[in-house]
Amino acid sequence: MNIMRINEHATQLTRYGFVNCYLVRAEDGFTLIDTGLAGSAKDILAAAAALGAPIRRILLTHAHVDHVGSVDALAAQLPGVSVAASERSLPLLRHPADKSLRPGEPMESFAGGLPGIKTAVTHLVEDGELYGSLRVIATPGHIPGHMSFLDERDGTLYAGDALTGVGRLAVCGWTPWYFPLPGWVMWSRSLALESAVKLLGFRIERFACGHGVVRGGGAAALEEIVTGISV
C-alpha cells in the first residue's frame, strides 16, 4: 500500500495504484474515510500506527466494494470504533443489498459490487452536518446515498466517487476513456452533474477522490470541468 501525506491533517493510502482511502487527523485520533478493498485492513492499521494515532471513526462515502471492503476486518480489530454512513446507504450495506429505489429518485439501474457489511453503522451522517472537522455534503449520482466530506480546516474535499482524479479531475460519468470503470457502475449522470454543481458553492482547495492522485485547482478547476460538460 502506498502512503502519501497530503498535508498536516491527512494521508492518502493507495492500493493497486488506484484505490484510495484516507486517514484524517482529529483531536482524538484518525477518521478513516473509506476502507478500500477486502484485505486492506492490515496495511491501514499499520499506516495509522506509523503515523502515531489510533483510528477512532470509519466514515463511508458509499457502499461499493472498493470503499467498504475492509470495514468488518477493521472493526474486529478496533473495539468501540464508530462507523458512519448516510441513512440512504443502509439498505445498500445489507447482505444481500436492497437496491430498491425510493420515490423521487431517478428510475435508473446501477451496478458495482455491493458486498454489504456485518458491522453496525453507529452514526448516520446528514447533508450539512459537521462531523468533526468534516462538512458532510450529499453528492448522489454515482450511487444513491453517496456523500462527500469537506475538511473545513484546509479545504480538502474527500469526494469518494462523486469525482475522480485519474489522469485529470473529472465528474463521475464523464471520466477519461482510459478510466471507464466509474461509468460502468453509474446510476444517474444527471444527479452526478447536479452534485458537482452543488460543490461549487463550497470553499474547496483540493480534491481527494476514491481513485487517482490528489488534485489541486480548487473550485475554479471544478467549475471549468462542469461548464465543459454537455448533456
Image: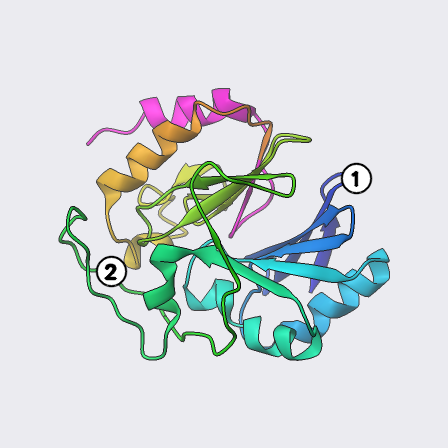
Q: Give the answer, above or below, for where 74 lies relative to 60.
A: below
Q: Residues within 10 Å of mark 1 (few under 14, many from 20)?
A: few
Is residue 181 shown to the viewer in this render? Answer: no
Q: Quadrant of residue 152?
A: top right
Q: Where does the magenta region start and end?
A: 207-231
Q: Give the answer, above or below, for where 150 lies relative to 99.
A: above
Total of numbered circles in the picture? 2
Q: Quadrant of residue 192?
A: top left
Task: Specify the color scheme.
Answer: rainbow
| Dot 1 and dot 2 residues touching (CB under 8 Å) | no
Kindly identify the residue that appears in the image at 53 percent across and 42 percent down.
149
Kindly identify the residue that appears in the image at 39 percent across and 69 percent down.
93
Q: Residues within 10 Å of mark 2 (few under 14, many from 20)?
A: some
Kindly identify the residue that appears in the image at 28 percent across and 54 percent down.
186
**Which amino acid type is marked by label 2?**
Phe
- Residue in front for this viewpoint, 164 or 52: 52
SS of the residue under disc 1: loop
- CA gap, disc 1 and disc 2: 37 Å
Q: Give the answer, above or below, for where 151 lies relative to 56.
A: above
Judge left or right: residue 102 versus residue 25: left
> Would you name the residue on which mark 2 appears?
110
> Which x, y percent locates residue 24?
69, 48
As drawn, the label of residue 8 is 1
Quarter in which the N terminus is drawn: bottom right
> Which x, y percent locates residue 14?
63, 58
**Which amino acid type is marked by label 1?**
Glu
Q: Is residue 212 magenta?
A: yes
